[in-house]
Amino acid sequence: MPPFELPIDIALARPVEDFPTGPDLLLSAKVDGWRAILRTGPDAQLVSRHGTDLGRTFADLLQVARRLPEATLDGEVLAVLPDGSLSFALLQTRAGGGPRRGEPFTVHYAAFDLLGLTNDWRPRPHAERHQRVLDVLDSGYRTLQTLPTSEDPTLARGWVGDLGGGVEGVVAKPADRPYLPRYGSGWTKWRRRHTTDAVVVGITGTTPEQQAAVIAQPDARGRLRPVGVTLPLGTRLRAELAPLLRPAGEGLAELPGTVAGLPGQPSFLYQPVLPDVILEIETAQATPTEFGRFRHRPRPVRARADLTADQLQQH
């Protein structure tokens, strides 16, 4: 019998601005995938962090998982390209479906924690759980592996940017802590941030506190394409942008939720503005995904009065 039923309330990592340091920390790569709990063995299951059954979506993973001894793992589902790079955008093409013939990627599961064997391992220290997960996945199956983990901060920093940018940061976990729901385990996550520029093409949000910029960047032909929606602008930046933005028409426009980094969410309305203002943004990705959008909502930094939209398109 399994040690506990799925789904469970998973452990979460609290975002931090500075690279995590300190004694007795295990550092693991933060990769761009779908967080999921995997139960291996004859009755294999794959459940998302929100409790959704992913067995049909990733039937190819479960086929391999059934060959392993019974265990319950925490980790990430990844889309791996032939060159070893990761693609979150391609991973999302599995949503609502399953394996498709001719897909340009292979689905992998990268485990970073052991939650149970025939008994519940969550109360045990993280260092003990991590060592055991290495043993469980020492099976030679290429698509079921463990995430890189180390106590060396220099080594961990070196992972960031690997796998075609798929390693976007580092998660730090106290070696002596049990696995607890939400933020109880004391995990923290740090992401490398990138700074770039984009054109403001609209404003969305129903209240001043929620107002955010719809941003665009030039595509390969130099045409402006929406690439995301920023986090809320904040009081200072709203005041800075207000005299600079000029409405483009009187009506509202509509964009799909995916532009705002919200796959599966409904479309949203925004007020278009003339593409006169450049905004410096801070992102978790150096460039938009191959689907032409930023996965995470960028943080707006400041208006760039020294640049025009034409100059941005020439960069």
Image (cartoon, rainbow, N blue to C red):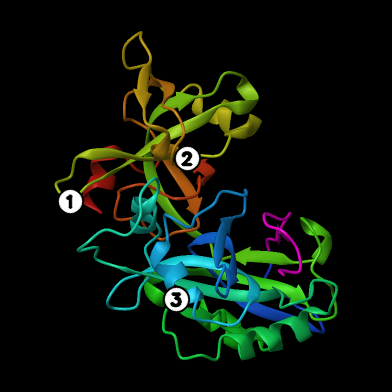
Q: Would residue 312 appear left or right of 263 to someone viewing this image?
A: left
Front of the two marks 1 and 2: 2
Q: Quadrant of the N terminus?
A: bottom right
Name the residue beneath numbered marker 2: 262
- Counting residues from the start of the chain, the first of labels 1 and 2 encountered is 1
> Residue at 76% of width from left, 55% of height from top?
182
Identify the residue at horizontal 47%, vertical 56% (top origin).
195
Binning the other alpha carbons within 10 Å of mark 3 as few (below 14), some (14 to 19) or many (20 upward) gives some
Give above or below for 43 relative to 152: above
In 3D space, how far apart are the residues under numbered discs 1 and 3 (Cα atoms)?
40 Å
- What amino acid is labelled 2 in the image? Leu
Quarter of the image where the C terminus is located: bottom left
* Location of residue 3 by image quarter: bottom right
Bin the neighbour count of mark 1 within 10 Å (Cα to Cα): few under 14, some 14-19, many 20 and up.
few
Q: Residue at x 50, y 75 (%)?
A: 66
First reached walking from the N terminus: tag 3 or tag 2: 3
Magenta portion: prevailing SS class: loop
**Viewer-closest of 26 and 227:** 26
Q: Is residue 20 visible?
A: no
Q: Is residue 147 above or below residue 247?
A: below
User: Is residue 42 depicted above or below 149 in this figure?
Assistant: above
- Whether 168 is among the magenta residues is no
Q: Is residue 11 magenta?
A: yes
Residue position marked by numbered label 3 in the rendering: 64
Q: Nearer the viewer, residue 22 or 145?
A: 145
* Tag 2 secondary structure: loop
In the image, residue 97 lies at what x, y percent?
A: 35, 49
| Three-letter code, disc 3 | Val
Tag 3 near tag 2, CB within 8 Å: no
